Structures are given as structure tokens and as C-alpha cells.
Image (spheres, rainbow, N blue to C red):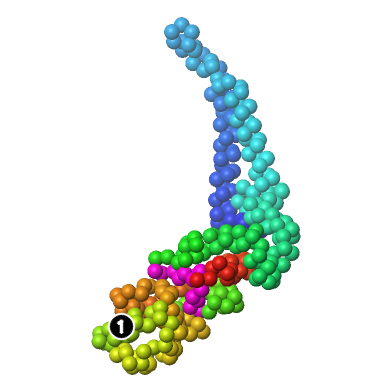
Amino acid sequence: MPAADLPSDFWAGWILIVTAVSVAGLAWLIYSVYFGAAAQEPEGDETVWDGNLREGSHPAPMWWFWTMFASLAFSVLYLILYPGLGSYAGALRWSQGGELEDRMAAYEAEFDSIRDLIAVAPLEALRADAGLMASAKRVFDRECAVCHGEDGAGQAQLFPNLVDGAWQWGGAPADIERSIRDGRRAVMVGWRAVLGEAGVARLTALTAAMHGTGQPIDSTHAGHAEYMQYCVACHGPDGSGNPLLGAPSLVDAATLYGADLAAIEHTIAVGRGGEMPAFDGRLDDMHVRLLVAWLTRSDHAP
């Protein structure tokens, strides 16, 4: 049994004491009921009630004795074979953790070669296999759907859409894999203190006018000067964004926090922050590869 499965010395001592006292108490109870002084016929005159009721003349039936004795014998045998006496691991050296490790080792010996093949297989081959895509969907449902929704379309204006083709950190398979493995942390700072209410209003109007057009920024717009001073470094001179920085495009139709004026104003004035946790320690190479294949399927294109 691994040492980590056994209790510390302090708790091992308490477990040993409680277990030993419990077994000894059961043995004493069995003896006292059937063989102790209380089980013997009373000496001297007996007290008789109602003509034939005599004190101590009807001990517990013997089948109770054999049941309790069998329970005691089983308990002692169990404590010899299995862990139960503090840090004593038992003659069989069995533990739940050890059983799990053995089963995991057997599983890995049988399936590791297949998993390794999937982890390096071309994405096209994975997408063409309906069974593997069904497995990928189950991985998504278990690990990702709680935030991104069962269909991957995002939810709650907090978690992005993964099937619309708009990727904040890049939509290439390598970029998506890095997002899954390492996680992402996005930061949009608030500009109210710098721009003032009037500047925020101008940038809000400019951003709303840009949204979904796919066109370069209107240089004649009242908010163009603020944009070129404060926003261009991240979102680019044409508003198309920068995946290396996680700066989204401002001219496509995708949006996370909403495209209405109130949502845009809040984003500019107060800022936004989002975090994608890293799954590298939770998912293995096969799971990551399946997720990348599933997320880049052609029927997920916008």
C-alpha cells in the first residue's frame, strides 16, 4: 500500500485504539452474556412471578451467540488481511488507491498505443471519423460546455462563441491548442479617467459604427483621433485586431459582451477582463487533439 494511503502516526494511533477497544468490547459482551456470572442460574431462593416467571431462567438464544461470534471472527480476520489497524497495511497489502493504480496501469497498457496515434493523427483524419468526433463531443461536454454551452456557441455574454469562426487569440489549430493547453488572460483597460465622458462617448459611437462592417475606420469620424491615439496599438489601424495580443476585431460581427451602445460604453469606460483556464494538466494529448479537430470542423464555420 502506498504510504500516502495510510493515516499519519497520530491518527493511526487513534484508529488502532478505537478498533482494538471495539473488538475487545464485543468479545467481552459475548462472554458476559453467555458465560459470565450474569448467565449463571441465580443462587438461593428464586423470585417467581405469576406462578412460573423466574428471573434469569431464559438466556438469549444460542443463535445470537453464534451470530455475534461469527461477526467477531470475521472482524478479526478482516483486520489481519486488510488495512484497519492504524498504519498496518494488512497481510494482503490491498488499498483502494492501489487497486485504482493497477486498473489504470492495465488500461494504459491496453490503450496507450491507440491514444498516442490519435494524439499525432492529422486533423483531417480525425474529423472524418464519426466515432472520434463523437468522443471529442463528449470531452467538450464534460470539460467545456459548462462555460461555452453545449453547442459551443457561448453564453451569458461572458464566455465566447467557439463555432462562429472568430477567434480572439487566433483560429489556427496551433493557436487553439495553445489556448486549451495554456489558457488565456484577456485585459481591456478602462479609459474613462483618460478620455473623460466626452471622449468615451465619441469612441463608443465610432466602435458602434465600425461593428460588423468589415470596413476600415472612417477617418472623418469624431472619435478617430482618440482611436488612433489610444486604441490603435492593440486593435490595429483598420480595427481588425491583433490575435497575438488577444485584441479582438472591432469590424467583424462577433461580439462577446454585446454590441449595443451601453455594452460598448461600459467596455471602453470601465474595461473588461476574461480568463480561459489552462487544461494542460487536466487533459492529455489525445483529448486536446480531439478538441482541436472538433472545434475546427467545416460545419462550425460561420
Residue 192 shows up from this direction: no
Q: Nearer the viewer, residue 202 or 86?
A: 202
On the picture, is 26 further left or further right than 128? left
Magenta stretch, residue numbers = 157-169
Q: Residue at 66% of width from left, 47% of height from top?
A: 82
* Residue 301 included in the magenta stretch of the image: no
> Is the stretch drawn in magenta largely helix, strand or loop?
loop
User: Where is residue 34 shown, x and y percent of the image?
Assistant: 59, 24
- Is residue 171 left or right of 48 when viewed as pictured? right
Percent x, y of residue 8: 58, 58
Q: Which residue is mark 1?
A: 205
Element carrying mark 1: helix
> The residue under label 1 is which amino acid type?
Ala
Judged from this view, the residue extending furthest toward the left is 198
Q: Is residue 166 magenta?
A: yes
In this view, 218 is above or below 213: below
Residue 205 pos. (x, y %): 30, 83
For image coordinates 46% across by 84% down, the residue present is 241
Please give the name of the residue rendered at 46% of the width and 12% of the height, measured from the top-left corner.
47
Quadrant location, the N terminus: bottom right
Residue at the image point whose x is 37% and y is 82% from the top: 210
Q: Residues within 10 Å of mark 1 (few under 14, many from 20)?
A: some
